[in-house]
Image: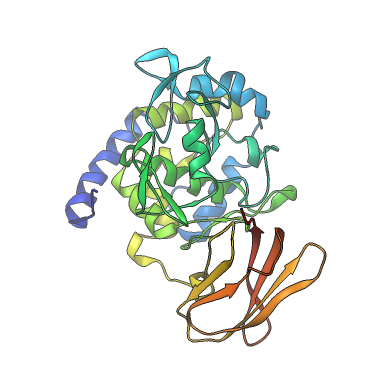
Amino acid sequence: MIRFMNRKIFSVLFSLILLSFAVRAQIPPGYYDDAIGLTGDELKTSLHNIIKNHDAPSYNDLRDFILKESDEDPNNSNNVLLIYSGISRSKNAFGGNVGEWNREHVWAKSHGDFGNTPPEGTDAHHIRSADVQVNAIRGNLDFDEGGDPVPGAPGCRIDDDSFEPRDAVKGDVARMIFYMDVRYDGENGENDLVVIDAVNTAPAPQHGKLSTLLEWHLLDPPDDFERHRNDVVYSYQDNRNPFIDHPEFVEDIWGDPNSIELSEELLVRCYPNPVDNKLCIEYQNNITLTYSLTGIDGRTYLQGRIEPGKSSLNTSTVGNGFFILLLKNENNTVIKKYKVLKATH
């Protein structure tokens, strides 16, 4: 695993790479004029206004022609490159079976529950061609480092709460997540999507893990494939991913990976999900929490208090189905809400 051993040297190299982007990327003249010189929330708002209200394709458009062009293998025009596995596969091998490819929502669609509905669910800037099995393995996990190797996807790793893509696309993934945060801010009935420094964020309209994604952005700068893809998607949607055109905008908005300030409410972990006979809740904050597990019928099946550290709830007496787990602080304010699936085999 490549680690970040010398940030000063890497920052110099990264800055030199940025100089070449301005020359090679096909950015429309004046596209980012309103954003130049801004930082923080002002920059984020300006970029949102530039890229919002794009021409949303249909979900079938992605399958029929957009992904076949945006993800085309530059060495074989008959194939697409699959994001996590890196495999070059025939454009005609679209489907749901082993050896086929399908549409992967990099910002997992359950993180905001937007499904395949425009604009979030069909935005080509975050939808990539992926191997069917690897797509299913990734599921709706947040992005972070560590875990076990993923079959059929060399360099990818997975654990209970996160998925790590191969090094060659770590930056691609990060910039797609950053794009979604800026593009969707709750206007016109759309989701307000937010990248946060946590995992286990579903079903909230959030995605993580911010500090890791910031490191991946630095580790894997935009390449020719990603810049070309940005141009192709722009030709269909009439909007661009600004973090491919101007990678420096990422630090201008979120800072460097070491600048992230954690909010205490984001340190709570709840796993596994689906759950069998034991549901674990883990946090380190020096507060006492109360919990309640409620079914879709409105009945409360479990409730009680938990202390900092790791607590285990006995769910063996709870039947199969979907439940809502609420965690509240001492002021009776909900600080976390989880959809939990009980599925005893």
Rendered location of residue 117, percent (x, y): 70, 38
Residue beneath the point at 67% across and 49% down: 113
Taking depth in this image into account, of 132 and 236 the one nearest to the observer is 132
Q: Is residue 31 above or below residue 162?
A: above
Taking depth in this image into account, of 151 and 61 the one nearest to the observer is 151
**Residue 326 picture quarter:** bottom right
Instruction: Evaluate whether residue 158 shows in this view.
Output: yes
**Residue 168 picture quarter:** top left
Residue beneath the point at 53% across and 70% down: 280
Q: Is residue 33 above or below residue 193?
A: above
Q: Is residue 333 above or below residue 28?
A: below
Question: Is residue 13 left or right of 248 when viewed as pictured?
Answer: left
Rendered location of residue 312, percent (x, y): 54, 75
Taking depth in this image into account, of 158 and 186 the one nearest to the observer is 158
Rendered location of residue 275, percent (x, y): 59, 60
Residue beneath the point at 56% across and 33% down: 124
Rendered location of residue 9, percent (x, y): 17, 52
Count of marks placed on residues:
0
Question: Is residue 17 left or right of 288 when viewed as pictured?
Answer: left
Instruction: Evaluate whether residue 33 shows in this view.
Output: no
Q: How is the image coloured?
A: rainbow
